[in-house]
Structures are given as structure tokens and as C-alpha cells.
Image (cartoon, rainbow, N blue to C red):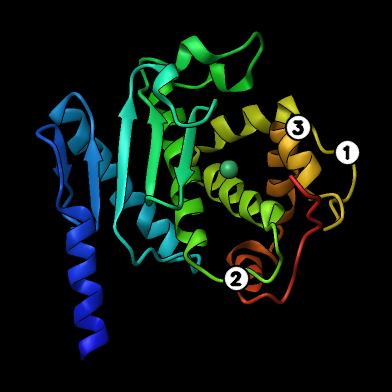
Amino acid sequence: MRPLASLISLAVMIASPVSAEALRCENPLVTVKADDPAFAAQVCELVANASRQLNACHLKRTYPLTIRVLRDASDMAEACLGSYNCKISQIDVLHPDTLPETFVDESPYGEMDTMVYFNSLLMHELAHSAFEQLPCESEACTAEQEYIAYAMQLASLPDADRQIILDAKPVSFTVTLESLNSTIAMMAPTAFAARVWEHYSMPENGCDFIGKIIDGKVSLRNDRF
Ligand SMILES: [Zn+2]
């Protein structure tokens, strides 16, 4: 029993130092920091829904997680709309009100309702956070990480919103594992996302394929980034 007890005390220790604007979700492993308590509660709900989808796809988070909702893009740890820092188990994501400021011309994501887009970004980062705690056979794992994150992100979208992404980057070939590589993931993320969906949505793939990635039964090509 001792290791479990130690783990629980560690979990409490990590999650405890919460500031005034932080909200512990019903799932005690998750803390949300946002400037608006009502919105923080809404994010807790979104995380609960997302976790059901992730759990059904072999992606169960077992460690504490903090989610910071930021209004200023310059406060983000990385120059992106959402990020996950595995060292401190923290997701940063931009507030839906700020997201429209970040869209470059003709971004397909700009056609979506901002809350729908926010929810999908959150799902992307939650998938990263769940996968990060699992062992990965490949040294870099970038392609596997992004496959899982985009599969879960696109699965979280209503059909019409997902179609916006698929129409923006039509896939005109049969998606091979070779074509789901880390170079595309980093250099052309929307095209990568469309390829992932094409592959993930085939009946023989889906959560079974994600399970194979997790078990190290398949690997994607990882260039060094
Ligand atoms: Zn990602």
C-alpha cells in the first residue's frame, strides 16, 4: 500500500498550491486557472466531457494537471494557441475571446465558433497530456504525439466544423504511415490533421490504432525536431 499512498500524497502536494482564481474541478486531479470563475467551471465541464472521449480511446490521465486559460497570447509558454508542459503538468490555452486575434488570413479555424474551436484545442492538449505519461518506443515520438492529439481534436468537432478542416486541406491520396510523419506535423499541421483524420476514421483504425501506438506495435516516422 505504501507506493500508492506515496503517490496520492505527491498528487495532493502538486495540486495544492492554488491561487485565488484557481478552481479545483470535480475531478480532483484537475485544476483550472482563469480570470473568470464561471468560465473556469465551464472548462472543468469541457475537461470532464473530453476525458470520457480520451478514456474510451486508451488515454486515461492518472496524474494531476493544471490548465491555465490566458487572455494574452504573449503570456503563452510557447508561441502557439495551446501548449502542454510535461515537466510541470500544465496546459496553457488561449481564452476563446482572444483566439480570433490569432487567426492569420484564411485560417480554416477562423470559420468555426470560437467556443467550438477552444474546446477542440483543449482536447488536443489533453490528449498530449494523457499520452505523455505513457512510455513511447520511439525516441522523439513527435509524429505519434501529434497523430493522437489531432485525432482526438478532430473527433471532438461537430461534423460540419471538422469538414471545414478537411475541405481546407483535401487529401487526394491513400494515407500511408509514411505520410503521417513528424515533418508534415511540424511544417503543415492542418494538412497533417486532415491526413490523420483520413487514416483514423477508417473502420480498422480509430481507437484500436491509438492503442497500437500506445503499445508500441506501430510507429510513425520521426525526424528530429
Ligand atoms: Zn500538438
The answer to which of 215 and 172 lies nearer the viewer is 215
Q: Amino acid at mark 3?
A: Ala
Estimate how packed mark 1 is, as few (under 14), some (14 to 19) or many (20 or more) residues with alpha carbons within 10 Å.
few
Give the residue at the far bottom of this rendering: 1
- Judging by the rendered image, the residue that carries numbered circle 2 is 214
Which residue is depicted at the point 32% across and 30% down?
A: 69
Establish if 82 lies above or below 98: below
Earlier sequence position, callout 3 versus callout 1:
1
Which residue is depicted at the point 72% across and 28% down?
A: 167
x then y, percent, for residue 83? 48, 38
Q: Cβ(mark 3) to ligand 1 < 8 Å?
A: no
Alpha-carbon distance for marks 3 and 1? 16 Å
The answer to which of 163 and 43 lies nearer the viewer is 43
Give the residue at the far left of this rendering: 20
Which residue is depicted at the point 79% across and 32% down?
A: 170
Position of 96 compared to 169: left or right?
left
Q: Amino acid at mark 1?
A: Ser
x then y, percent, for residue 30? 25, 52
Estimate how packed mark 2 is, as few (under 14), some (14 to 19) or many (20 or more) residues with alpha carbons within 10 Å.
many
- Judging by the rendered image, the residue that carries numbered circle 1 is 172
Earlier sequence position, callout 2 versus callout 3:
3
